[in-house]
Image (spheres, helix red, strand yellow):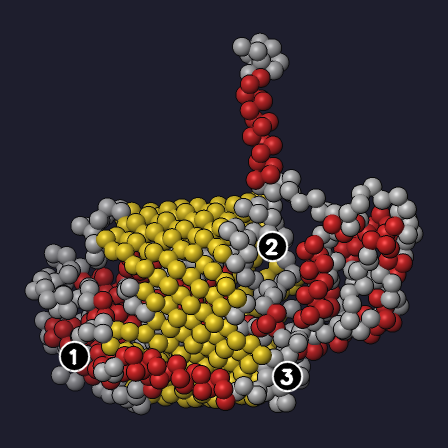
Amino acid sequence: MTAPSQSRSRLKTQDPCKQVATAFFAVVALQCSLAEAQPLRLRADSLASTRSPVGLLVLTGQDELKPWLDAETVTWLGFGTVGGPTGLGDVLTISVRARHAKSGSEVRLGRMVVTMGAVRPIHLDGARGRVRLFGGTTVESFVGMPVQRGFDYRSLGFAAGGRVAQAFDVTTIGASYLRRLEDGNLSDEEIGADFALTPAPWLTAAARAAFDLVGRGPSDVLVSASVQNSDMRLEVFSTHRSPGRLLPSTSLFSVLGDFASTSVGSTVRYRAFPRLELLAQGQGQTRGDERGGQGLGRVTLALDDAWEGTCGFELRRVSFGESRWTGARGLVSLPISRRLRAATELEIVAPDDPRGRGAVWPWALVALGLKPAESWDLAIGVEALAGPSRGAETFALARLSYVFERGRR
Amino acid sequence: MKTLFGGRGIPQIVVLALCVFLASCAGILGIRPKSPERAFDHRAHSLRGVDCLTCHKGISLAGDEGPLHLPASTVCTSCHATPHDARDCSSCHGRGATRENATLARKHLRFSHANHAPAVKGQCIPCHIAAGSSSQSALRPPMAQCFTCHNHQESWKTRDCESCHVDLPKEATRPASHVVHEGDFIREHGVRAASARELCASCHTESYCASCHGVSTAALPWRFSFERPTLAGLHRAGFRQRHAEEARGAPGLCTTCHAEERFCADCHAEKNVGRAEIAGQARSPHPAGWVRARGGEHGRAARRDPGSCASCHGGRGEALCVGCHSVGGPGGNPHGPGFTSALDPSRDTPCRSCHTR
């Protein structure tokens, strides 16, 4: 059994119903305990599928008397199928934040996703702080242990980093650093630079670049610039990624010396008529001596002036490296009444080289959404597909969402 | 056959059909709105010398609560003594969306006309520039207009949103400018957020990021909203069945969110697909010629997409590579041309897997 499988097995319980019930009562208890705190938000989504049921519980709370303090948590619940039905659950975030609203300074403790400038995002159990100084200077830092599933720490990891940024009138520039150790070994060490420019509401540009200090080369670079008005938006972008340097340095596959991939492309969105929107995207890609590209065209027609109902069609072509396929997708989303909505979606993918995986991979969904009350939201659907790894399959889906809010006006 | 211009012109029937088609398109495409509502012509009233306060009586003294001071039909009929219709004037003159916008602004913004009127000497147009146009109905000033004032510039710099916005997450508004949610937001948000994470955080909570970027699960919001196919999102529609093709078409992209060494293996184990040993097969999933005495295709494939290799052979699976490629082994040096690393070959993982043997 591999290490990940071992960690997974520790999360399993003998009685999945017991685990889900425990989580449910924990959330109810948390709701009751925070009932006096305001504003308070609870969102609970449960998605039952004949394939695998999952749930997502989101709770945020803020004390009205101490508005500088708030807390939130997101918990995922589900069922696994390896070796028979088993219950799985994980806390994605659980953190408390204290902040100074006027300056924008804050400190957060707990489990969180840390994204700091150009260095890679990291899911962390630890602390993150930000101080805004006079003159538009921002200093951020974080320290903690990279998240393992379900607080299951097989090895002791450590991550720390920070960012210094300076904002000018229309420009922000920043420099960031990340160092991560896994089981005593250096896993990631990166420096990054980020840049944003907004000289006018119709013109924006942003860039970020991360440099891998272990592999001694750029790991991830993105550049984007756009011009826009109410009817049209044109974006030009470029990306450069080194797959080997993006892997942890503890991986054997990070030291092979890879072929970085670079792409340059553009996206145009045009509101041709009040109810008709066109979108086109094209990009050229290179990797070593390989050349290729991909393109996408989408037409969206609104069925009413408020764009509550729409129908759309999308055509996509990918031709790069071993990935050569054409896909088409059509959808209709129709409000039947104020509380009832119907939607259907059909996608067909045709690989150039099926290699025994089927000439086309169709996928279809028919769904109904109902909002019986302000706080309740439910949806049912049927999903059917025929994919490359398995034969034709059909699944039934049902989602029930509940939102509880209590707070300021 | 009759033609439009005689001789060899366009047949009249074609012209007629084209006209009918275009007329129907005008409705379908929204060129000819079905609603009789149209923007209230503020400009025409201003040019006739009607002061703003004549209709919006008392607005200059209004605080951040209370009525909106939108004129009732009686205000209109005080001048337009013989209205052409018995219905309420606002049912056609002025758009419902504009009134709804004003109602939402009252609910979600801390704004007092009484505080602002002295600063602009009682003039409305410096803020409500749109009133100068006959076709503009959205009179709520854009946020950029607020930043022309020194106080609000400071609020923007320090991201002190709450000095104006009552509750941004609840307001669920999209920024009018500065932050782009249009186009390919899924691809763009990473580069845009790099310099402006705190700006994103003024509306989006930790849960918003974590429900996609958490290590345990991915892209759940889109999976949950299956009845809203128009939502822009990652991994939509039949992504599950084309994910391998998507990954090959964008090398390294998956690794920016997923730890491929664990994520892929865990999911494939869960679904019991992909790996030969899991499926109980005795054969390799790789094509013929993958590994040969002189290397074969696997070396080049590993450099093109090392994440793909790591997704199955990561962790203990690396022993398969080390068996041939350790120092002095038959596989030779696996490092590519110009390879460089800051790792210590005698001490650091993964170098010592091969170099200390």
Nearer to the camera, A303 or B125 = A303
Residue A218 vs residue A310: left or right? left
- Closer to the chain start, of discs 1 and 3, is 1
Nearer to the camera, A260 or A123 = A123
Chain that bears disc 3: A
What's under tag 1, amino acid-wise?
Met
The residue singled out by tag 1 in the image is: A1
Give coordinates of residue A354: x percent, y percent. 22, 49
What is the quadrant of residue A38 in the picture?
bottom right
Residue A292 versus residue A109 in the image, above or below: above
Residue B245: in sight, yes or no?
no
Asked if both marks, 2 and 1, belong to the same chain, the answer given is yes
Q: Residues within 10 Å of mark 3 (few under 14, many from 20)?
A: some
Residue B225 vs residue A52: left or right? right
Q: Tell me the quarter of the image containing the C terminus of chain A.
A: bottom right
Residue in view at x 40 percent, y 74 percent: A56
Q: CA distance from mark 3 to mark 2?
A: 32 Å
Q: Dot 2: what SS?
A: strand
Asked if both marks, 1 and 3, belong to the same chain, the answer given is yes
Mark nearest the camera among 3 and 2 is 3
What's under tag 2, amino acid-wise?
Gln
Q: Tell me the quarter of the image containing the N terminus of chain A.
A: bottom left
Q: Residues within 10 Å of mark 1 (few under 14, many from 20)?
A: few
Q: Residues within 10 Å of mark 2 (few under 14, many from 20)?
A: some
The residue singled out by tag 3 in the image is: A101
Residue A228: which disc? 2
Q: CA distance from mark 2 to mark 1?
A: 53 Å
- Closer to the chain start, of discs 3 and 2, is 3
What's under tag 3, amino acid-wise?
Ala
Give coordinates of residue B133: x percent, y percent. 78, 50
Chain that bears disc 2: A
